[in-house]
């Protein structure tokens, strides 16, 4: 019968998994030495069978244990050797790339924080709106010419509410949030409404069918255009720098009267005139005005008691002016080399 000490010595000298498998087959395989010895005990007496079988099984179990032990030793040695050859454990680890907030969301957060500092609160509304909230309640009736300005995505009512016959649209601005807020609360109100808006426009360097806006609304007693002017002038300086000038130009919006466009001094040429500002020294920033009394009538506000102002700005435009970007599409192409700059 084989000596277990000899087998253990043989196993301990093995250096590879392949050689270890050969040893296993040699001793405990189907045609191995111990398997052969077990098949020969049938010729022995009952007492000898018992003693010999027990001893063979003990040797077999020990061999299995020693093979498994050696297998783990070889595996650890292989890993250690590989690590020593390929890894310098004294080197510092590779720095992890930390994700950043998208530049549009950075700009959105910056604008929100400025107006929160003015005492405004944030209000939100659905991206899909009834025609009433998106147009009618903002003094834009069915036959109003200003509807021609905005190419709107209409959604069939049957797809949303089989009992509704009112047209559903993807909102063309976040101004509908103002109507929802005024229907729910009485003045004083000071809110901003950030969110995505949708218009049926071709995508180019300055247009997209989906973009972001922030609308603002303040309603109270004795609010004047001077209040609006002060808030927006301070906003421009906080957003673009204390030396940047702004100006107000008369304009038209159906939901404000009087209405104005706000321009800011061109950041590229500092007001001298360049190709970016078309040699004027100014770039258009946002629209604003005093809330039209007809809008107050839709929400049942006393037009003799309350006045208010509203404004709206595109976040993409703010970001483009702030960072000197000349193509809106860059915000949506997910180019890491572009995004890493922010």
Image (tube, grey):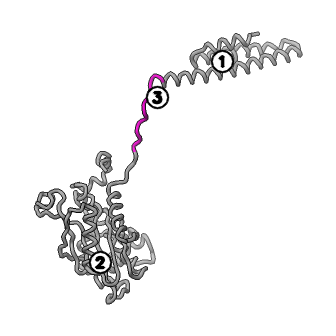
Above or below residue 56? Residue 204 is below
Q: Answer with mark 3 or mark 2, whichever residue precedes in sequence.
A: 3
Residue 167 visible? no
Q: Tell me the SS state at disc 2.
A: strand
- Mark 1 Cα within 10 Å, few/some/many (few <14, many 20+)? some
Q: Quadrant of residue 188?
A: bottom left
Identify whether 341 is placed above or below 250: above
Quadrant for residue 33, please give it.
top right
Q: Which residue is mark 1?
A: 24
Counting other residues with Cα less than 10 Å from the Cα at mark 3, is it few (<14), some (14-19), or many (20 or more)?
few
Q: Toward the viewer: 191 or 129?
A: 191
- As drawn, the label of residue 41 is none
Instruction: State how far apart marks 3 and 2 are (Cα).
Output: 64 Å
Front position in the image: 262 or 65:
262
Across and down, in percent, residue 216 comes to: 32, 72
For disc 3, the marked residue is 89
- Magenta span has 94? yes
Identify the residue shown where x is 35% and y is 88%: 302
């Amino acid at each position: 019968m084989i000596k277990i000490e000899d087998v253990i010595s043989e196993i301990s000298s093995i250096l590879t998994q392949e050689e270890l498998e050969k040893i296993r087959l040699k001793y405990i395989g189907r045609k191995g030495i111990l398997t052969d010895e077990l098949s020969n005990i049938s010729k022995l007496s009952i007492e000898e069978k018992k003693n010999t079988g027990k001893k063979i099984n003990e040797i077999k179990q020990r061999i299995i244990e020693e093979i498994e032990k050696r297998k783990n030793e070889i595996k650890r040695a292989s890993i250690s050797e590989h690590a020593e050859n390929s890894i310098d454990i004294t080197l510092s680890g590779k720095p992890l790339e930390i994700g950043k907030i998208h530049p549009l969301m950075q700009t959105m957060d910056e604008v929100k924080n400025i107006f929160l500092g003015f005492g405004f609160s944030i209000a939100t509304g659905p991206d899909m709106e009834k025609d009433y909230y998106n147009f009618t309640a903002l003094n834009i009736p069915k036959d109003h010419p200003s509807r021609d300005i905005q190419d709107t995505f209409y959604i069939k009512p049957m797809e949303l509410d089989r009992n509704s016959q009112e047209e559903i649209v993807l909102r063309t601005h976040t101004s509908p949030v103002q109507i929802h807020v005024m229907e729910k609360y009485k003045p004083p109100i000071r809110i901003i409404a950030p969110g995505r808006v949708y218009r049926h426009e071709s995508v180019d360097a300055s247009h997209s069918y989906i973009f972001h806006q922030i609308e603002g609304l303040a309603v109270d007693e004795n609010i004047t255009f001077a209040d609006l002017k002060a808030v927006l002038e301070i906003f421009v300086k906080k957003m673009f720098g204390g030396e940047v000038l702004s100006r107000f130009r008369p304009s038209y919006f159906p939901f404000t009267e009087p209405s104005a466009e706000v321009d800011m001094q061109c950041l590229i040429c500092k007001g001298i005139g360049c190709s970016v500002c078309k040699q004027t020294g100014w770039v258009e920033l946002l629209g604003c005005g005093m809330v039209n009394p007809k809008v107050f009538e839709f929400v049942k506000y006393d037009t003799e008691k309350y006045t208010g102002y509203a404004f709206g700005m595109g976040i993409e435009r703010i970001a483009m002016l702030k960072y000197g970007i000349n193509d809106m599409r860059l915000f949506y192409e997910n180019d890491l080399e572009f995004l890493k700059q922010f």
